[in-house]
Image (tube, rainbow, N blue to C red):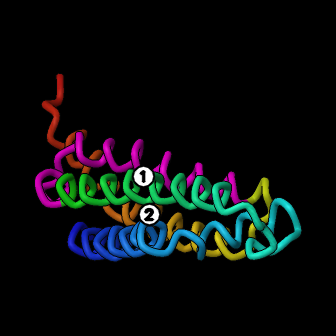
């Protein structure tokens, strides 16, 4: 089960990496969807170039931070998770949970269907990846504990 979970988490991290790169390379793709959800207007309707640069710049920053999280996730996956180290499971739970859950809640609040779909896919991959091997990380330790007579 651990190998399956590692593959699922690789897919999740690759998916998150692509999503992050879209924010870095073409921030208007993600920004446009959120802007339309919040304002009801297309991003192209904004005529203030400075405002557009600032908005795109903040999405680029978010993309860079997300990409750093993905790179860290690969490190955690190959250094600890793949070896069934508990700290790696907890790291994925906390960091992945914050990353996908925040995005999911945010897109639900602003009713952004495009980004909501993306975050649901990421959240499902994340949950499957950390829940499939849960016995490997926690039950095994309890079974190996010495029994008192």
The answer to whether residue 119 is visible is yes
Q: Earlier in the sequence, mark 2 or mark 1?
A: 1
Which element is circle 1 on? helix
Query: In the image, is residue 72 above or below residue 40?
Result: above
Q: Residue furthest right?
A: 40
Q: Position of residue 11 (x, y in %)?
A: 34, 76
97 falls in the magenta region: yes
> Answer yes or no: do the residues labelled 2 and 1 have beta carbons within 8 Å?
yes
Nearest the viewer among 126 and 33 is: 33
Is 31 above or below relative to 4? above
Q: Position of residue 101 (x, y in %)?
A: 57, 52
Secondary-structure class at tag 2: helix
User: Is residue 139 visible from the viewing direction of this image?
Assistant: no
Quadrant location of the C terminus in the rendered image: top left
Which image quadrant is residue 132 in?
A: bottom left
Cα–Cα span, label 2 and label 1: 7 Å
Label 2 CA crowd tier, 10 Å (few <14, some 14–19, many 20+):
many
Q: Residue under label 1, please give it.
A: 96
Q: Main secondary structure of the magenta part?
A: helix
8 w.r.t. 134: above or below: below
Q: Nearer the viewer, residue 52 or 128?
A: 52
Tell me which segment is drawn in magenta.
78-107
Q: Which residue is mark 2?
A: 126
Which of 28/63 is in front? 28
Residue visible at 34% across and 60% down in the picture: 67
Locate residue 60, reporting x and y percent: 46, 59
Question: On the picture, is 113 further left or further right than 119?
Answer: right
């Amino acid at each position: 089960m651990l190998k399956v979970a590692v593959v699922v988490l690789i897919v999740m991290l690759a998916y998150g990496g692509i999503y992050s790169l879209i924010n870095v390379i073409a921030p208007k793709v993600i920004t446009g969807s959120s802007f339309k959800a919040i304002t009801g207007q297309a991003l192209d309707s904004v005529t203030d170039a400075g405002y557009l640069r600032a908005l795109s710049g903040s999405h680029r920053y978010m993309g860079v931070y997300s990409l750093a999280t993905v790179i860290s996730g690969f490190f955690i996956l190959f250094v600890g998770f793949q070896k069934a180290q508990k700290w790696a499971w907890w790291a994925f739970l906390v960091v992945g949970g914050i990353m996908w859950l925040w995005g999911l809640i945010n897109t639900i609040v602003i009713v952004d269907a495009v980004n909501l779909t993306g975050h649901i896919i990421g959240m499902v991959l994340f949950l499957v990846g950390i829940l499939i091997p849960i016995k490997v990380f926690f039950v095994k330790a309890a079974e190996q504990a010495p029994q008192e007579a």
